[in-house]
Image: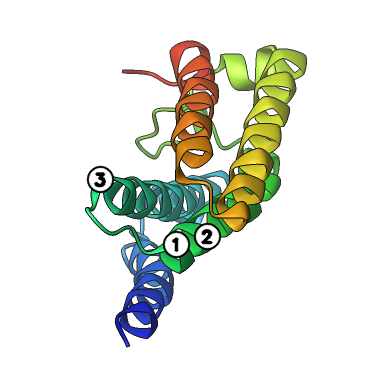
């Protein structure tokens, strides 16, 4: 029963996050294609963060819910696979919507693509080890995934 409740909460939260971000779409800059892309990107990052936080909280639990960990890892893998599409040209600082995305995402497209590929590889490994049920391997892979996030944030995200 707890698993169903956890999964339902994660699905509901994901849907509400995207819906709320779109509902907050102000009648200003977010009505431009670049502005809308920023709003949608931010909603996707909130989903990614929520999945990672939920997975991490399970790992800290005395009795981690392996199904919830697997769900969170699979969600992260799916989101990471789509991440490059969240950055269309014109959705940087010039979009007129507050964003932490640095211009280097577009001026160093090759480097950004490499960082995104690294995140995709690490989240795929995370999903694989989560499916195995080996919690020590999951914890190790969480550290590697965190490193992939940090690498990208250090270069392509404003503080």
Locate residue 9, reporting x and y percent: 32, 76
Q: Nearer the viewer, residue 82 or 97?
A: 82
Disc 2, disc 3: CB below 8 Å? no
Q: Choose the circle earlier in sequence order: 3 or 1.
A: 3
Q: CA distance from mark 2 to mark 1?
A: 6 Å
Q: Which mark is residue 66?
A: 1
Disc 2, disc 1: CB below 8 Å? yes
| Residue that sits furthest to the left in the current view | 62
Q: CA distance from mark 3 to mark 1?
A: 12 Å
Residue that badge 3 annotates: 60
At horizontal 53% and vertical 37% (from top left) the residue drawn is 137
Locate residue 59, reporting x and y percent: 33, 47
Left or right of 98: which side holds 94? right
Residue that badge 2 annotates: 70
Neighbours of disc 1 within 10 Å: few (<14), some (14-19), many (20+):
some
Locate residue 11, reporting x and y percent: 43, 75
- Colour basis: rainbow
């Amino acid at each position: 029963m707890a698993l169903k409740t956890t999964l339902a909460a994660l699905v509901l939260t994901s849907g509400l996050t995207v819906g709320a971000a779109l509902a907050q779409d102000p009648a200003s800059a977010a009505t431009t294609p670049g502005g809308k892309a920023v709003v949608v990107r931010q909603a996707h990052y909130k989903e990614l963060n929520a999945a990672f936080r939920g997975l991490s909280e399970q790992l800290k639990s005395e009795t981690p819910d392996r199904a919830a960990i697997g769900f969170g890892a699979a969600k992260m893998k799916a989101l990471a696979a789509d991440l490059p599409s969240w950055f269309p040209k014109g959705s940087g600082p010039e979009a007129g919507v507050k964003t932490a995305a640095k211009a280097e995402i577009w001026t160093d497209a090759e480097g950004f693509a490499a960082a995104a590929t690294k995140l995709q590889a690490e989240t795929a490994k995370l999903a694989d080890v989560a499916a195995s049920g080996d919690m020590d391997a999951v914890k190790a892979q969480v550290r590697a995934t965190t490193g992939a996030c940090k690498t990208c944030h250090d270069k392509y995200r404003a503080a």
